[in-house]
Image (cartoon, rainbow, N blue to C red):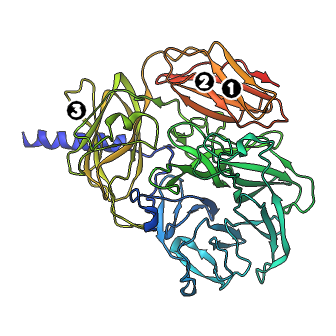
Amino acid sequence: MRKKIIAIIIFLFVTVVSMQAQQKTYCNPVNIDYGYTPFPSFTEWGKHRATADPVIVNYKGDYYLFSTNQWGYWYSNDMLHWKFNERKFLRPWNNDTKDELCAPAVGVIGDTMIVFGSTYTSKFTLWMSTNPKANEWKPLVDSFEIGGWDPAFFTDDDGRLYMYNGSSNNYPVYGVELNRKTFKPIGTRTPMYLLQDWRYGWQRFGEYMDNTFLDPFIEGSWMTKHNGKYYFQYGAPGTEMSGYADGVVVGSKPLFDGIQTFPQSDPMSFKPGGFSRGAGHGATFTDNFNNYWHISTSIICVKNTWERRMGIWPAGFDKDDMIWCNTAFGDYPLYLPSANADPQHYRPEWYLLNYKKPVAVSSTLGSYYANNAVDESIKTYWSAKTADKGEWIQSDLGNLSTVNAVQINYADQDVEFLGKQTNIYHQYKLYYSADGKKWNILVDKSANNTDVPHDYVELATPVQARYIRLENIHMPTGKFAISGLRVFGNGNGEKPAAVKNLIVLRTEKDKRSAYIKWSPVDNAFAYNLYYGTAPDKLYSCIMIHDFNEYWFRAMDSQKTYYFTIEAINENGVSEKYKVMKVE
């Protein structure tokens, strides 16, 4: 009998471990141990995690990630497992500065990494390291006098170094060359680009791109060189908006001092729909297989304007050297970097199984209702009354489904921390069941010792389940609260039918805008609307849940546009509508 019990325990252990074998996918928002806002004045509506303005550079085969006010940085060799190095970059004479490395600039010169934080002063240090993995840093310039807010570094193929900076709704972003020995500017800053929201609709400020109470902001510079051309990237029109995006201007030199430039009509990274929205103020980098990626800021912005996260998406250049970033299904599972990456197959065919489906919970705090955890909005969440061990939430998938992965997005309810924490952790168990009576362990993280606010688990072996239950064991702080219990796989049913009729009404009054309607599909819960300025370049995508209409205000008033749409449910996507030309 004893041997039989031991055998059963070993079998269960091996089964659980095998389910959590090496992952090939990840899921946005990026699952790292985000720090909490360090500013008490930002916490009047509740303490919360916050960061933004990310940069990733590939240095000696590792990916280094810096972002705003994290009191350190992360590194990874696979873009999935991130290790945090605790480090503060302010010096004793920066005692009048609240931000610790806000919107940082990170560059690579030869074998040296350089780092600099946003400042309007002349007293910030420019740092250097040849071993950032070991957290070894020293001042390169004690006081980098030129300063600059939202800075970015770019080293050209000839070794010349440039800096770009600026964040304003009145002035352009600027660029200047730096002396490689003294790191002083060579000449004066030259304007790179000023927003043209009179032409480009997506540049208008506001959640509805209407310039309601402010003019749009331009900020967050980045430069990428490809085939002898310079792709200057900038964030606009506002960090707190779903339409926060990274635009592109192409030139023949690293400084646009009087040369002809070519703004792309649509932003390269744009994600105004879905669970996690926003894709602005970021950076473009290559992986170890020479594939391009783009990281940007995504929004929550509930407890404070600056409550934000980060997302990473595949990017690249097409045959005509147009830069693109693929945010379609950008918060569904995506493939990690690999040698055989295929831009046409950048994600597995796994779909959301539990959108707005029945939920049961152990308790509910106030009006933080259970269905907030399955409504595909990171802004809303369910909260239990406590953080006690044993609080739970259970999702009914509606029918027996193939489950391939689960993402657990924790929310901040009654949390207690300010600033970065390095010794906190989540612990939980995930169960699955075919009938809601007999339960099996799906994932056991009861011994986890890491902070995983957006944990994502890919199963090596998919399971057949109708019910998924998440049981709390330990929270770092606050209540047991979930903004998204997201289950991915296939519902084992029919894919949605194709949209039969797509109507795009673009008016002469304002050709930046259009009213778009389409025939509803009975078995679809969402739609992907694709568009672009050429029929073979529909690189922008908006995911729209529930409704069969969209007020679209993001066009270039001087260009012809092309549209298509597909319907989505838990079983897959429909065929796309024939590409439509709209003058």
Q: Residue at x 46, y 52 (%)?
A: 31
Q: Residue at x 62, y 33 (%)?
A: 542
Q: Are marks 3 and 2 in contact (CB under 8 Å)?
A: no
Query: Of the residues shown, which amino acid type is indicated by label 3?
Result: Trp
Q: Does any portion of residue 338 appear in the rendered image?
A: no
Q: Which residue is mark 2?
A: 549
| Quarter the N terminus occupies | top left
Q: Is residue 122 above or below residue 214?
A: below
| Along the line of sight, the residue nearer the viewer: 340 or 425 | 425
| Along the line of sight, the residue nearer the viewer: 544 or 507 | 507
Q: CA distance from mark 2 to mark 1?
A: 8 Å
| Quarter the C terminus occupies | top right
Q: Quadrant of residue 514?
A: top right
Q: Tell me the SS state at disc 2.
A: strand
Is 445 left or right of 170, judged from the image as shown? Answer: left
Which badge, 3 or 2, is on the more N-terminal residue? 3
Q: Are marks 2 and 1 in contact (CB under 8 Å)?
A: yes
